[in-house]
Amino acid sequence: MSASRAAVILAAGQGTRMKSAVPKVLHKVGGKAMVDWAVDVAAGLGCERTVVVVGAHSPVVGQHVGARLGEGAVAVQDPPLGTAHAVRAAEDALGDFSGDVVILYGDTPLTRAETVAALFAKRDSGANLVVLGFEAGDPFGYGRLVLDDSGALARIVEEKDATDEERALTLCNSGVIVVDRAVLFSLLSMVKNENAKGEYYLTDVIGLARSSGFRAEVVVADEEEMMGVNSRVELAEAEHEFQARKRHHFMLAGVTMIDPWSVYFSHDTQIGNDVTIEPGVFFGPGVTVESGATVKAWSHLEGAHVGKDAAIGPFVRLRPGAKLSAKVKIGNFVEIKNATFGEGAQASHLTYVGDAEVGARANLGCGTITCNYDGFDKYKTIIGEDAFIGSDTALVAPVRIGARAFTGSGSVITKDVPDDALAVARGRQKDIPGWAKAFREKKLAERAARGGKRKEAE
Ligand code: UD1
Ligand code: MG
């Protein structure tokens, strides 16, 4: 049987190269804070306890993690004296946990749980310590993995402490390690800071483990998964890779994208099969699109649900709480916020619907506006099934339009409309026969008297 699992996530770095008031690990990739990517890897691995090591300089990281995992999951490393020192800072927060500990990082959002699972599998098959390594295109700056003749890991040497021969090695340390808790902390207590950087190196535990008779092994993964983010340039590179993965994933799951490279997803976007997504679509967090739906070009969705066989866009904005049932049609320049649309309801052009319930098959004409806000509070609009809202209707909430009711174009509706009624709320049309002809003749006569010249506007 495999051992219990816990995770220690290192996130105490300063992140100065981000040049940001926001701590590095709270910057987002795919709409999710980088530290949460690591927390989710730990969860995906079934870790029963996760401790995030934060720096004293950024209490907001502790607050962020505490809000999700509880205060007990936060350990403060003050001051930061190296990666071994950081892991030691997590010891108390691990409490009475016994079993395997995986060390993860708050600034490597592309590491996958499946990849780290291979380290646990190697632990279960007898290795005492397992390190995740990768073949680096450019190994500069990384710790190098020194293997022995049997292929086991002999030690890790940091760039600054390496000999020329060691620097020529391209198999590098990702920093991710799986090791039994008791072994880990007994080795950490032996780590010294007598090295080029004067830091307590986590990587020293390998050499120490070997001297104590433990066996260390390596699992090799793709370099791209190990990418750490230190600057906005690397943040954008990580985002790029995240988007590439999502596009690939959705296409294999049966989603058609005419130009996948122009479609942007969030970490939690859900898209059913046989959905077609046209170019230039952005999915913010919290969007679900059911199968058969079409999202036309240049639409922006966030916190929204698009039902089966619905069609939205082009140029649609769905804001949080927009819930569209099956077969809904939403056309160009329509914005929907916190509103439900029943099956087959439509809003085809130039409309704002906020804080509303729209019944099945209701049709909102061009220029329909829910006036939902008075500067202080928000009010609700309810539109019954099969209602027909005339073009340029302003619905002043709170207001209810009955089932099958009509509103006349240009109406400002301030009172509830009964089922099956027509509400007209605008000035009644009055015709003055011949007025235009008389006006024109008078003006032409005035112009002739001036010598045929138009009077120039001042
Ligand atoms: C480390 C590894 C190196 C590996 C590389 C992979 C050590 C000694 N070296 O080097 O072998 O190839 O990562 O990217 O471990 N941190 C703390 N507290 C500290 C120091 C660091 O929380 O006191 C965190 C940092 O925020 C960062 C991570 O640990 O997320 C790694 O630290 P960093 O200083 O970047 O180590 P490297 O020199 O890159
Ligand atoms: Mg680093």
Image: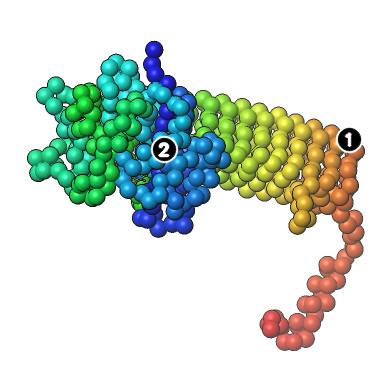
Task: Left or right? Give the position of 267 relative to 132.
Answer: right
Instruction: Tell which quarter ligand 1 is in.
Output: top left
Residue 353 rendering spot, x and y as whole percentages = 71, 45
Q: Residue at x 16, y 33 (%)?
A: 146
Pointer 1: residues within 10 angstroms few (<14), some, or many (20+)? some
Q: Is residue 159 left or right of residue 308?
A: left
- Residue at the spot 72% in from the left edge and 45% down from the top edge: 354
Q: Is mark 1 within 8 Å of ligand 1?
A: no
Instruction: Give the quadrant of the C terminus.
Output: bottom right
Most foreground residue, 327 or 152: 152
Real-space CA distance between mark 1 and mark 2, rounded to the nearest whole angstrom: 65 Å
Where is residue 247, by image quadrant? top left
Judging from the image, what secondary structure is the residue with disc 2 in? loop
The label on residue 419 is 1
Quadrant where the image shows the N terminus: top left
x and y, in percent, of residue 19 in the image: 40, 58
> Of callouts 1 and 2, which one flags the residue occurring earlier in the amino acid sequence?
2
Task: Give the residue type at disc 1.
Answer: Asp
